[in-house]
Image (cartoon, rainbow, N blue to C red):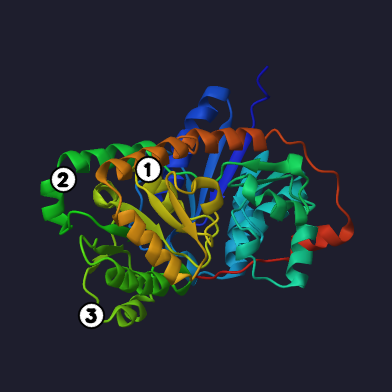
Amino acid sequence: MNPSPLHIAIIWQRFLPYHVARIRHLLACCETNGHKLTVIEVASQDAAYAFPNVESGDFDHICCFKGLSYHRLGIDEIRHKVFSNLDTMRPDVVLAPATPFPEGMAAYAYCLSAGKKAVMMDDAWEHTDQRGGLTRFIKRQIHRNIDAAFVPATSHAPYYERLGFPRERIIFGVDVVDNEYFALNAEIARTRAKAVRQRLGLPENYFLFVGRFLPRKGLECLVEAYQSYRQQVLDRQWPLVLVGSGEHLESVQKKAGGTEGIIYAGPKFGDDLASLFGLASALVVPSDIDPWALVVNEGMASSLPVIVSRGCGAAQTLVREGENGWTFEPGDANTLAHLMAVMSGLSADELAGMGEKSKDIIADWSLDRFVDGVMKAIEVPRRPSAGLLSKLATKLWKGRVSVN
């Protein structure tokens, strides 16, 4: 028996390509099940990601601040605008970002006042939680008014249990990408390898990094490891292709000095990015701290072996040691250099086998996983009424606007 049709609202700060892919897949499921889906984007620009504006013309959505950057907005105006939109449309259930975000707190305040169901989408875990004891206490109070936590994987569950969510209210599958897109376009790049390499200026074999140039992304560790790698491996050295941009670029270039083999490819998006995945030999994700690291999903969907820091939330779930890659402790340049040497010493068949294992593992992390998680989350019953302190915390806590 199908559940009664619901009006579902889902909120993100700004639509990035993986959000659009999830929305399209979720819309198809809602249409099949008779649910109404309203999609809310807080702002159409931001200061954190260099992605160009994403086309979303095939689905309707509300943009609260069209043409404006999220990071130039005030907390109160975000909270007021999001709350006002929700209060006007009166959805039955709202999926929203976590308590640090003003749009999330607007959603939880609406659900509290209207008696509607609230689902928190989050991928934080112990390693990324840098807040003090008072903040965690307030979070636990607010969580008493949130009906479910939609998080990446079972690896994250103990953290959310400690923050006040019973295990039966923790749903998995929030962090996925469009696997089919990356698999298809990576394969197209491989079939046209010579022409694509020439167009993008790519070497025959290379380690690939994709991400923002931020201190927490571990790029200094990667550069140091690569310098050591070149000293260890004197024959058939792979270049290192760094894709992305950001405030930390000059610092990384200074660290690298005149190291041969490092290629700064700049930001890449869409089919060009998929081509870079397709022609790479291995993906390296050296983050000191990262809630999940969706680039791991993208690389694995592109059939790449991976070397991933344990500072990434995805590491313990998606990387199987020696099967599709390896993990290492954040900041451990010596171990990373060793793993890069081992990786580049593998035969073409061994690399292909590890890449196929990556693709097999990530097959369980498709857009279907996200949609299944949403459908489970909206079926979780509402929590009993919380006490006065919890209600006050939900009404008064504002979140923050930050670039990280």
Write down the quadrant of residue 37 in the picture: top right
Q: Are marks 2 and 3 in contact (CB under 8 Å)?
A: no
**Disc 1 versus disc 3: nearer the observer:** 1
Name the residue tied to disc 3. Answer: 258
Q: Which of 283 and 344 lies nearest the eye of the viewer?
A: 344
- For the point 45% across and 53% down, which residue is it? 326
Name the residue tied to disc 1. Answer: 354
Q: Is residue 173 above or below residue 368?
A: below
SS state under label 1: helix
- For the point 67% across and 66% down, which residue is it? 398
Q: CA distance from mark 2 to mark 1?
A: 20 Å
Q: Is residue 218 above or below residue 8?
A: below
Name the residue tied to disc 2. Answer: 193
Q: Amino acid at mark 1?
A: Met
Q: CA distance from mark 2 to mark 3?
A: 28 Å
- For the point 66% across and 52% down, which residue is it? 107
**Disc 2 versus disc 1: nearer the observer:** 1
* Quarter occupied by the N terminus: top right
Q: Is residue 87 above or below residue 237?
A: above
SS state under label 3: loop
Q: Amino acid at mark 2?
A: Ala
